[in-house]
Amino acid sequence: MPDRHTETKAENKIENKTENGQRAKTPHTYQEWLHYGKTLLQEQGIADAETDAWLLMEYVSAITRVYYAMHGREKMDEAEAQTYEGLLKKRAAHIPVQYIMGEAWFYGYSFRVTPDVLIPRLDTEVLVEQAELRIEPGMNILDMCTGSGCILLSILKRHSVSGVGADLSERALDVARSNQKRIGVRGASWIRSDLFQNIGGTFSMIISNPPYIASAEIETLSPEVRDYEPRQALDGRADGLYFEKKIAEEARKHLKPGGWLLLEIGCGQGKEMKQYLAEAGYQEVEIVKDLGGNDRVAAGRTEHV
């Protein structure tokens, strides 16, 4: 992950490029600043340039689309404009917009995010949806590799259950704890653990979004993911399935009879994980696809007594 010095160098490079004449005139109005932002991000290869330019303007100025439509030709506050330009340069250096703003939306809730945790993604909402289909009141849930806590907290916010979030990173757990207060959830506790090393007791459900990208594929990811998101939360070792299988193997000791295991998996991993879960003794094994038709969740449960 780039350090602060590396990020500053990238931002300065963009700043110098802008100062060398690429900007025809200094923006003044909201419309001019938004156009400048979109153009700058497009020139740096940002895929969602227009969306991100707007999100940063909305973040800095606290304006709505309606306000912009009515007042777009008005001059932007000078201090806000300076802040906006600084954030645009960060985004142009491929720092994820969620890290710049310090928040990301997931399952209808706004979560705090830092470079110590993965940015919650829409695909992971499928994992929460599958958990909700199987939840019963009073269940206790273990969220392994919890990160920001978005999975566990989204479930606890909507259901009368309790849960434990486990992660190897204490900094990630600090983010999760802050999100518990932010979302306003009771019934969650947090523990630092290398997988199941410090986990005691049994659970009605174990849910996890572990690292599942093959090591060789990491360098092919977008700069936003490859350079800024925590590598240990991405790298699933040689075939991407090391942690999936390790969790599935150890989870059986920590699941109650009839307890559910739900794992987020990567594209093309469904067939192997389905076979692995079945051979490991899980029942009702199922692979669920996301809206794009890609393998996304592997589910199975232990035997009833």
Image: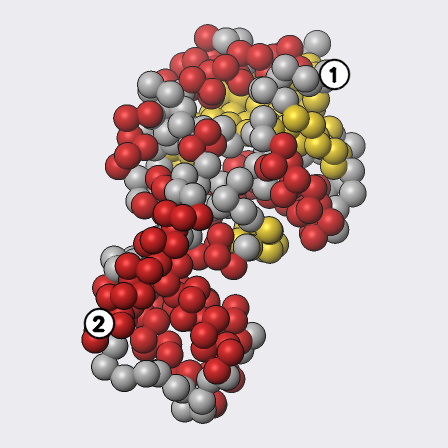
Residue placed most toward the observer, 13 or 284: 13
Q: Residue at x 28, y 26 (%)?
A: 216
In this rendering, does residue 132 appear at all?
A: no
Name the side, left or right, on which 301 lies relative to 204: left
Name the side, left or right, on which 263 lies relative to 237: right
Name the side, left or right, on which 214 lies relative to 253: left
The nearer-to-camera label among 2 and 1 is 2
Q: Residue at x 58, y 26 (%)?
A: 168
Which image quarter: residue 110? Answer: bottom right
In the picture of the structure, the residue carrying the numbered disc 2 is: 20
Looking at the rendered structure, the kind of residue marked 1 is: Gly
Q: Is residue 216 above or below residue 87?
A: above
Q: Disc 2 to disc 1, how far (Cα)?
A: 63 Å
Q: Is residue 74 above or below residue 278?
A: below
Q: Position of residue 185 (x, y in %)?
A: 74, 46
Residue placed most toward the observer, 218 or 289: 218
Q: Position of residue 263 (x, y in %)?
A: 51, 27
Which image quarter: residue 15? Answer: bottom left
In the picture of the structure, the residue carrying the numbered disc 1 is: 201
Say which label, 2 or 1, has the lower sequence index: 2
Q: How many marks?
A: 2
Considering the numbered disc 1 on the image, is that residue within a helix, a strand or a loop? loop
Name the side, left or right, on which 162 lies relative to 24: right
Q: Is residue 44 above or below residue 31?
A: above
Looking at the rendered structure, the kind of residue marked 2 is: Asn
Q: Position of residue 63 (x, y in %)?
A: 53, 78
Considering the numbered disc 2 on the image, is that residue within a helix, a strand or a loop? helix
